[in-house]
Amino acid sequence: MSSSTRRRTAWVATATLSAASLLAICGIQPAMAAGPATVSVPAAAPVKAAVADGEYAQRFLTQYEKIKNPANGYFSPQGIPYHSVETLIVEAPDYGHETTSEAYSYWLWLEALYGQVTEDWAPLNEAWDTMEKYMIPTTADQPTNSFYNPASPATYASEFNHPSSYPSQLQSGVTSGTDPIGAELRSTYGTPDIYGMHWLADVDNKYGFGATPGAGCELGPTATGTSYINTFQRGAQESVWETIPQPSCEEFKYGGPNGFLDIFTKDASYAKQWKYTNAPDADARAVEAVYWANQWATDQGNQADIAATVTKAAKMGDYLRYALFDKYFKTIGCTSPSCPAGSGKNSAHYLLSWYYAWGGALDSSAGWAWRIGSSHAHFGYQNPLAAWVLSTDPALTPKSPTAKADWSTSMERQLEFYRWLQSPQGGIAGGATNSWDGAYATPPAGTPTFYGMAYTEAPVYNDPPSNQWFGMQAWGVQRVAELYYASGNAQAKAILDKWVPWVVANISTDGANWKVPSELTWTGKPDTWNKATPGANSGLSVAVKSYGQDVGVAGDTARALLFYAAKSGDTASRDKAKALLDAIWDSNQDTLGVGTVETRADFLRFDDTYVAGGNGVYVPAGWTGTMPNGDVIKPGVSFLDIRTWYKDDPSWSKIETALATGVAPQFTFHRFWAQTAIAGALGDYARLFEDDAPPPTDTTAPSVPTGLVAGTGTSTSATISWTASTDNAGGSGVAGYDVYRGTTKVGSSTTTSFTETGLTPATAYAYTVRARDVAGNVSAASSAVTVTTLPGTTQDTVAPSVPTGLVATTVTETSVALTWTTSTDTGGSGLAGYDVYRGTTKVGTPTAASYTDSGLTAATAYQYTVRARDNAGNVSAASSALSVTTRSTTPTGSCKVSYNANSWNSGFTASVKVTNTGTTALSGWTLGFSFANGQRVTQGWSADWSQSGTAVTAKNAAWNGTLGAGQSIDIGFNGSHTGTNNNPTAFTLNGATCTIG
């Protein structure tokens, strides 16, 4: 799978802080900084005489020079690395000539390796300086940080799983914790500014927002040079194809009357503002690269050449600690918006989370500012090497008094995180969250936890699932391998000892047909973490779903294997990495670097429009706005409709053909990060192994498998297991096993067990196993083991009895609960379950004699029948039909409302208690009432408040939508009045009139 199918940044855009009406969506943008000065593209520096002359060092330099050659188009006129050479590419960045903090961090890695080979460190310093100038907001870009109050860091706004639930209401009634590092950072560095990268920039100002670093806010399409922007803002289901781009600095020149703010958050009014989002893994990678640069420069006697850059990297690591805290600084283990606000460091999960963000007002006379961390942690973002460096290396230990201790704790916590998420096969599962559904909800019963945080298979985003892409494995584990290589950490080694063999067995290096894992399939979940006695995670499993030729993933996977091999002495991982790099170098070089053809089925989404509850660009009903080029943003637009300039791209004809035919187009892309990953792997091999004697050719087969035993089987399947072979003599390592039934090879396994299906009952089968090594040598056959399948049963051709006694036990406006008498099965195969039909449509397949049909329309008649199924596939006749009419939406007398207002001058605060006096729970609620004296709701909490004329509506928040029979919920709001403030005289709940009391 190409990296296009993964989404690097899906942070929810919410959170803020402010006086009356602010703001904010946290994923976002900036405003100004040195204008588009005439800056030369950073071409490759002349190679010094000290350059190593080994084959792989020369390959590294060849790849380096292709990346740095101005004619190849990796850098803008300002010297900024593009996401890709090609412009028509949609993935995390939605345009190829945007850039990311990821690209800058890879650039730093590239120059660190260049300095190691050539002893020329000027390009590394230039890379950091460019990053600082164009990707770290200057004081002018974050002008009101001085107003930030660490005791009140941000105003809560819930995240939602689907874009259609946005905008999200700001809720001052949900308490945020205290930011424990804000004052410390300001005191340490003498500035309120944040020293961290924003994640996304429009390098050529293609959108035309003109949020130019250091120069101005929304300077428009005529501005030249890079511009801070943001895209992802709306929950886990928002893919890049559903984003609405916006500037990082909002002066309301584009979008609607409130710019783009009211697409994402709901407030009584909106203020002009700036806002940025940091991608912590990129800043951590920058620290990582500078650490190695400092080691190599010191060994060369050249440390003074990069001393200033090393100091800046330590400072970046100090501010990176914001990623170690919960989004709203809530205590860890939070399962309700009302959970305790954090104090001190008890809001720290100590993991590198998906983002941290900060923002504030543009108007310094009405100044305010906010900061948030993130509640969601993905294993692929962790960097225990950076945490180790920031807590142990004197040159890179941050200046703040508590930073060293924070990073020391973080390193240990990150390694535990990997261990907790590691499957028996070796792959690492997704991650954890401190805010279930982004709303501090209670996780489902049985959800495993890690220090109180809930396991989630696909943290942060679901389209596609965030842990489906194998690249996360390469990124996340490469840093574990670096830590092991640099420190010998035993925990890191234990993780790698399981991960590396799994990866080696799933890489093919067959010349031009080389392949690495692309997509993974996950089942089950890990055990709840217990540091003293970690579980075996026997219920968690991973399988490779597909393979591909992603050169970036291949490069970073090779780097992980090489660091591990260099420390452990494992020749199998070394040789596999070398063979993979050789295959790519021999088969995929081109004038720009290395490239492979990608089939992009997702590009067929260019013109998709919104489908209710599904995919497409969601724009709230009634909202309209414009992009700087005049593209209209309104309900019903597609990705292309608000990016019509794509039609002028040189490659657009491929998309036109694809959209017309439905056939996925093919492209060859040159992503900056991927090209650098290949260069990095070549540099690693040159540094770690080039001076070694050539590895001897492995011509010795692994040891013969022993100890074959039969496992639990069925009438049609047989399972065997055996003792693992070794490959100590040959040295290339065991790659897997071939299983034979008699003389027929029936399968292969990378583990020490195998199950064959489709066999005949009551039949004896003899199995042998042969071991294979990485070099292709195959052992002799093991001793045979005989397995006899269980006896079969007489074929069942008799259907189960017809279900009887079909009744509706509970009927609501939107659901019908059915039960019936259990059927019997006299055919012998046993009852398997039931098929429930609404009319002629099958709506459910329960295994028990009950079913609830939901999502129905109120006051509507439905007819149900049920059929029974047995394990042989026989289906009974339909039961007698049952007609049911759902309840009307206007029941009365099932709710009570208590309303109390505290008035002053021209304002008031209202406290509202809503009680469900009915006999069934409400799965969602809407309170309605009207004012008689011109009052206005200005800000509310614990509900989604809106007002049209005199009518006020309060809809449940994500976390309090269920209101059980007899239960109450407290909500409230601040309002304004003109002198008279009489209480409302009537209330409705879901359309039903409520009693008042």
Image: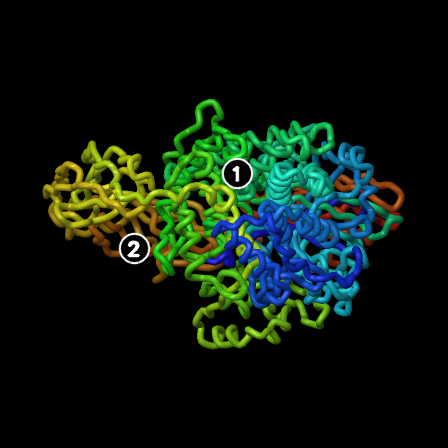
Q: Secondary structure at mark 2?
A: loop
Do the numbered discs 2 and 1 sit on residues whose CB atoms are within 8 Å? Answer: no
Residue 880, label in figure: 2
* Residue 954, horizontal then vertical, whole percent: 67, 49
Q: Indicate the quadrant containing the C terminus: top left, top right, bottom left or bottom right.
A: top right
Label 1 sits on what residue type?
A: Glu
Q: Residue at x 17, y 41 (%)?
A: 781
Lateral position of residue 708 relative to residue 880, left or right: left
Residue at label 1? Answer: 482
Q: Where, by quadrant of the figure, is residue 189 drawn? A: top right
Q: Is residue 93 visible?
A: yes
Q: Nearer the viewer, mark 2 or mark 1?
A: 1
Label 2 sits on what residue type?
A: Ser
Name the residue nearer the viewer: 72 or 317: 72
Q: Where, by quadrant of the figure, is residue 205 drawn? A: bottom right
Name the residue nearer the viewer: 186 or 580: 580
Residue 746, label in figure: none
Spatial CA distance of label 2 from label 1 is: 67 Å
Q: Indicate the quadrant containing the N terminus: top left, top right, bottom left or bottom right.
A: bottom left
